[in-house]
Amino acid sequence: MAGQGAGRSPDTPPGGTGGRVADRGAIADLAARFRRALGDGAVISEPEQLRTYACDGLTVYRATPALVVLPETTDQVREVVRGCHEAGVPFVARGSGTGLSGGALPRTDGVLVVTSRMRRIIEIDIPNQRAVVEPGVINLDVTKAAAPHGYYYAPDPSSQQVCSIGGNVAENSGGAHCLKYGFTAHHVLGLEVVTPDGEVVELGDGTADPVGYDLMGAFVGSEGTLGIATKVVVRLMRVPEQVRTLLAGFRSTDEAGSAVSAIIAAGVVPAAIEMMDELAIAAAEASVKCGYPAGAGAVLIVELDGPAAEVEHSFADVERFCRAAGAFELRVAADAVERAEIWKGRKSAFAAVGRISPDYIVQDGVVPRTSLPAVLRDIALLSAKTGVRVANVFHAGDGNLHPLVLFDSAVPGQEERAEQVSAEILEACLSHGGSITGEHGVGVDKVRHMSRMFTGADLDTMQLLRCAFDPAGLCNPGKVFPTPRLCGEVPGKRTGVHPLQEAGLAEAF
Ligand SMILES: Cc1cc2nc3c(=O)[nH]c(=O)nc-3n(C[C@H](O)[C@H](O)[C@H](O)COP(=O)(O)OP(=O)(O)OC[C@H]3O[C@@H](n4cnc5c(N)ncnc54)[C@H](O)[C@@H]3O)c2cc1C
């Protein structure tokens, strides 16, 4: 979940990720070493400047890093990571800092490695339908570079104008069109990675099905805990022959939900199906005047793409299903301008909520698609019971909810109540067989929910993988896992014998 506008006191994030006292001598030595290797302009140590990196998109948690470095090449990243490894100083990678789970929250005793100077598109390889890019490249810039060839990069987080490919890889980011085309994991063909001990390795071989264990698959979605990606090979897709978009207004989310079920049950796979409820529509209206159907309790945006004949055929079905489910207004985009008009309200939805509430939490949970109506009812009941307003915006096709929990941090007790409601929404997702995060990751924010979803044994097994990459526990420590296990979240050896070791199933590294 992400809290916008509210703020905890500086350098006091939960989970022990900040507030630690830096070893000033070690940090000064590293600053001098990195200045020699990377140049003066690539190292930031002034407190005022360091503070600008204190949070990512989850602004409620803040921790001022001890040092910030801005490498330009893989060799420079390797030098920085080696320096940290040798000095036993933790480090955190940061792309554009738009993450909504605190994944790029710095360590007050550590180094923040920012990839914003690594923005080269190294190759657009049309015959092999792929591109090789540096990690700081902005998501939308890949599509811009491929567009003249009739290609594009499919994963499209709503933050695509600003977020980086490295951040997308680390978060396995999704977006409106991932229903049909899959998440970032389905579009990464190879990675160059600086491992936490400062080696450069290649994961994947740039093809769709590399031989051996899928270490690249393990890296995608690992939230910056297994190393720093320094090059990414991504798949490019052909721009579809036709795209058709409609906006449907319904009286209720139940009606809109049954339209979604009917569309999917008929075997139609839209490029996107997005839903917004009444409060989310009101926020978008107040912010960007999107002109969605008056009186709608929910709207659906359905987009189909592909060969023209197929799109035309399926589009007629979609219109029919929407009407049968109770749509009282259907608008079909006649051209790209009208398409953009339809998307405007949805794309601005998160920020738009700022128009109807001073503060809000962006929650991210998943439920099986068929449970959407039940979970939405649970959320409505919760909201009525607590008086906390919740606006719902979501990727209806894959059951990925983004409830926006509204509060005013100036009113005592409201923030705590909103956090409670937010946590109960995740409980509702879990009780319907869902998950605590769809696309925003665990980061620091959802660490406390991990043990609701996984057993201790599950978490220990995941830690084995992490320890295999990062035995010293220096790479983005304090994220994803609730408690230090096996190789530990802090440098140094774990004492005592772990149950997995006792059972002969694992060794400590
Ligand atoms: C308005 C808004 C809309 C959003 N919409 C979506 C959406 O539709 N779908 C979605 O999935 N997300 C969405 N997000 C969340 C966010 O944009 C994504 O998680 C994005 O992938 C983060 O990219 P970033 O470059 O900002 O990464 P950062 O926030 O800088 O970092 C995110 C994580 O990646 C790690 N990391 C960064 N670079 C590297 C690297 N080179 N190697 C290894 N680890 C690295 C960091 O350590 C951190 O753990 C949205 C955010 C905002 C603010």
Image (spheres, grey):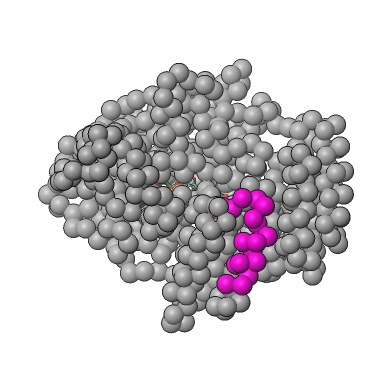
Q: Is residue 153 rendered to the left or right of residue 226?
A: right
Q: Is residue 320 above or below residue 33?
A: below
Residue 142, image x and y in percent? Answer: 56, 34
Instruction: Examine the structure image and report whether residue 204 is included in the region drawn in magenta.
Output: no
Given residues 36 and 380, the one toward you in this image is: 380
Q: Residue at x 79, y 35 (%)?
A: 242
Which residue appears farthest toward the left when viewing the image? 25
Q: Residue at x 63, y 59 (%)?
A: 393
Locate the C terminus by quadrant: top left
Which stretch did the figure color magenta? 359-382
On the question of residue 177 being in view, the answer is yes
- The front one of 235 and 404 is 404
Q: Nearer the viewer, residue 227 or 500?
A: 500
Q: Residue furthest bottom?
A: 412
Q: Is residue 83 visible?
A: no
- Return the x and y of residue 450 as percentages of the image width and height: 40, 53
- Identify the residue at the far front of this view: 503
Q: Is 371 included in the stretch rendered in magenta? A: yes
Residue 404: image x %, image y %? Answer: 57, 64
| Image point (25%, 43%), residue name | 499
Compared across the picture, whether 502 is left or right of 277 comes to left
Q: Position of residue 216 (x, y in %)?
A: 43, 30
Q: Is residue 350 above or below residue 270?
A: below
Answer with left or right where residue 183 lies relative to residue 238.
left
The answer to whether residue 295 is above or below residue 459 is below
Number of marks in picture? 0
Residue at 52% of width from left, 74% of height from top?
A: 407
